[in-house]
Image (tube, rainbow, N blue to C red):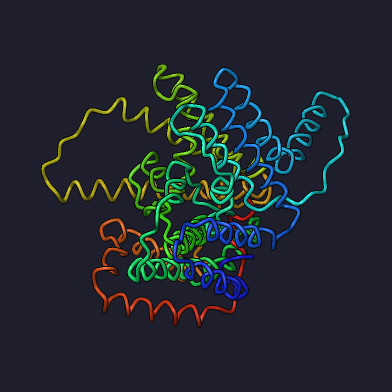
Amino acid sequence: MIFNSLFFFITLLPFLLFYFSRKRKRSTTSKLGTLGYSYFFYGMWNPAFLLLIVTSTLVDYLAARGIETAPHRKKLFLIASLITNLGLLGFFKYYNFFVDTFATVFAWVGLTWSPPLLDVLLPVGISFYTFQTLSYTIDVYRGHLPAESSLLDIAVFVAFFPQLVAGPIVRASDFLPQLAEEPDLNRREIADGIVLILFGMFLKVVVADNVAPRVNTLFGNWQGNGVFENWAAAMLFGVQIYGDFSGYSLIAIGIARVLGFSIPRNFNAPYTAAGFADFWHRWHISLSTWLRDYLYIPLGGNRKGTRRTYINLMATMLLGGLWHGASVMFVIWGGLHGIYLCLERVVRAHMSPIHISYRAVRYLLLAGGILLTYLTVSITWIPFRAVNAAQGITMMKGLFWGKFTVYDQFWLDYVVILLVFLGHCATRRYDVFALVKQHKLLRGVLVAAILLSLYYYSGSRADFIYFQF
């Protein structure tokens, strides 16, 4: 079941009627109702997937309780959680990738190995909820969080339907306390949630889904593209994936807001980043902070010397790429971002601080940094979107070598890119949601415009890209 479907809203309505009929919104009854709808929501893809999420829930509930009640054995409980969760993730998502990779390596050295490949479906959202539930057990192990005594609360935390299948990845320290408090539900909070949902639907349906056919055409013609077409493919896919993923995140945050929950922001105008570290402070924030707290810092972060810092950055970004999918192209995508981050640290380490008194010059340098970051990040979208290495490598080479001809849809492609980029830059300076909250007339006009555009562009509907991860 997906957010941009009529069936979702038809099934959501009776749940909302039940939810708001409870006098105590965080009562056991309301939690059971929330859990029941979350399992129904997830089970609509495949009921068998519910066994996996229930297994992860039970294992991490018991592991956290064991860590707290038997601290002398806490490492064993943590290992049990890691083996179970990462084992399930690895089996369903990476088994075929790794055995195929090993078979290829064996073939290079003259050995023959034909391992059996699995014909299994990848459970939707397994990467997201695995990281989410693991973070709870790790935080309990570190002493940052007490173990939750209520299995029901842990189950709601793991399976909460708005962000279950594609994030944002929520921390137990942020979510569990909200289950113990009475929600501050009022008309304003509900109205704000609805506005977020509409903005998210706009980004998904109007922006992402309408750019997608053009992206498919450009990537489909990868062998005949010129330089300008390859750049258009990279940047338009950047538009598509931002609209798709940030749209989903806004819908998730909005639905949670309607239910009285606060979920952290997942995007903050990422294409206005003036550097690669800045980009990762703005793009998929819940994943980047997870990788920082549970991988980069435990590896040593930047505390063990320059060389080790670069190794830690590369390891984190390579694993971050692999988290997205079992493909060499995702590893290349992560590796490129790792290289960018390392090079940025090298440059900053050897540059003296520049003090510029003229505001115009500062703005010009900022604009140059934003444009350079945007273009180099756009390069990485080629391997992220490519279906195989041949396509990815050919198109990446084609960004710099090939035909410099103005093709038929050149102006349309680049006008769309420019308009989206300029609109995106405006959100760096102005908080659109704050303006909408403050000005009722502006809110009414924007809501009406979004509803009209959703009606006009409602013909094409596609799954969210991040469902495959």
Residue under the point 37% across and 64% down? 185
Relative to 68, is 252 above or below?
Answer: below
Residue under the point 61% across and 62% down? 37
Residue under the point 86% across and 25% down? 111
Could one spot residue 191 in this view of the protein?
A: yes
In the image shown, does 254 or 261 lie closer to the viewer?
261
Is 148 on the left or on the right of 216, as rendered? left
Question: Whole-percent x and y of residue 459?
Answer: 59, 79
Question: Whole-percent x and y of residue 259?
Answer: 45, 63
Question: Whole-percent x and y of residue 49?
Answer: 72, 52
Relative to 80, is 273 above or below?
Answer: below
Question: Whole-percent x and y of residue 163?
Answer: 53, 55
Relative to 187, is 380 above or below?
Answer: above
Is 371 on the left or on the right of 173, as rendered? left
Relative to 346, is 283 above or below?
Answer: below
Residue under the point 24% across and 73% down? 439
Could one spot residue 408 in this view of the protein?
A: no
In the image shown, does 228 or 3 lie closer to the viewer?
3
Q: Which residue sits furthest left?
A: 357
User: Which of the 4 image quarters holds residue 161?
Assistant: bottom right
